[in-house]
Image (tube, helix red, strand yellow):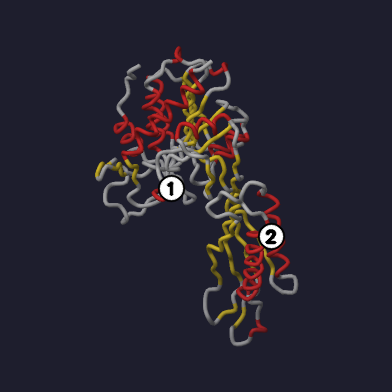
Amino acid sequence: MAGRIPDFPELLAALVGTPSISCADPAIDMGNRAAAECLGGWLEDLGFDCRCLPVGPRDDKVNLIATLGDAEAGDGLALAGHLDTVPYDDNGWDSDPFTLTRRDSRYYGLGTTDMKGFLALAADVARDYRATDLTRPLVILASADEECGMDGARALRDAGHRPARHAVIGEPTGLVPIRRHKGILMEAIRVTGHAGHSSNPAFGVNAIDGMRQVLNAVCRFRDELATRAPAPGFPVDHATLNTGVIHGGDSPNRIPARCELQVDLRFPPGFDIAPLRDELRAVAHEALAESDCGIEFEELFTGTPAMETAADAEIVRAAEQLTGRTAAAVDFGTEGSFYNALGMDTVILGPGDIDQAHQPNEFLGMDRIDPMRDILHGLIGRFCLRP
């Protein structure tokens, strides 16, 4: 079927040209509704039934669920991705981030690889199918706020509605299927002391000195965690803990009353978020057992579970056959664990490269488009056309 929608470059240009940044900073944060309605409008022209479901209290943040064929038939395939992007550096781009620019056999623009390019390609491929062709539904699922907490995927999980039995998330994997990835949590540890004049340490309780003890304990925990459960197959084959931010005090001649450490902890399948967070807090708390300092904790990021889809799952085997690559593991997180929790066997597979994500001059190589198109046709044939 020749759908009455633009071709792929125009689709991608329209999505890139519709800003949808998500960010913890309210001054930068945007909704994704305009981008979702843009994508949904094309899909409706192809016969999809489209629903925009609000995520949280804001009306401009939505999940788009677009279904072609009989949703009641069950099973089927979801082509999934997020419509939001990260912020961008004002001085890092050689072209306007919101204008799709073609040069050097690449498409440049914010979100081209992470991951508006995949969603535009899914819509482009979908033009070749009618609802009457399908024995099982084809779903295009576009979520909100993946970059800033995965709120869209959490909302779908919490609603308990499974739009399809199998899912492909088009995150940038260089056309390599991924069936396992690490989970992540982020935590702030705040040590509190008592301010005083620096001329006499007895005038106060030094929070930076207290944090030194906490930091040493956290680093020992990091080293022990790395040896506790080897994770063969991952690029970094163990859990990691990054001490990413530390700040405290305000003047060299004052005893500092506060010091804060922020950490990022990534873990392979087999670990759960809550016990790891509890253990991290216990380690930090114990480090100050003999100190006059206090300690406080804050969840900076609730966390994303690790993902593992069975090696013999039908979607894994199909992705391996169509790409000629064995399903692998990555250290970054995706929405896959939330979709697996809904009962969708999920593979991460997209045309972009992860080293282009979150970078100035983000691009999608044109040589990846036709191979990804062929993979999508193969998956649709396998999961939506065959009885």
Quarter of the rendering occupied by the C terminus: top right
Quarter of the rendering occupied by the N terminus: top left
Residue 19 in the image: state x and y as whole percent.
37, 41
| The label number, if any, that marks residue 354 in the structure image | 1
Residue 45 in the image: state x and y as whole percent.
37, 19
Q: Which of 44 and 239 is in front in this view?
A: 239
Who's the residue at 52% across and 49% down the image? 332
Residue 307 in the image: state x and y as whole percent.
59, 42
Please tell me whether residue 244 is drawn above or below residue 201 in the rendered image. above
| The label number, if any, that marks residue 281 in the structure image | 2
Amino acid bearing label 2: Arg
Horizontally, is 89 left or right of 151 in the view? left
| The label number, if any, that marks residue 32 in the structure image | none
Do the residues under discs 1 and 2 have CB atoms within 8 angstroms? no
Mark 1 surroundings within 10 Å by alpha-carbon count, few (fewer than 14), some (14 through 19), many (20 or more) = some
Please tell me whether residue 246 is drawn above or below residue 359 in the rendered image. below
Q: Nearer the viewer, residue 18 or 68?
A: 68
Instruction: Label 1, secondary structure: give it.
Output: helix
Mark 2 surroundings within 10 Å by alpha-carbon count, few (fewer than 14), some (14 through 19), many (20 or more) = many
Residue 28 visible in the snapshot:
no
Q: Which of 7 and 55 is in front in this view?
A: 7
Please tell me whether residue 326 is drawn above or below residue 238 in the rendered image. above
Residue 170 in the image: state x and y as whole percent.
46, 37
Q: Which of 259 and 384 is in front in this view?
A: 384
Residue 174 visible in the snapshot:
yes
Please tell me whether residue 151 is drawn above or below residue 206 in the rendered image. above
Amino acid bearing label 1: Ile
Who's the residue at 31% across and 56% down the image? 91
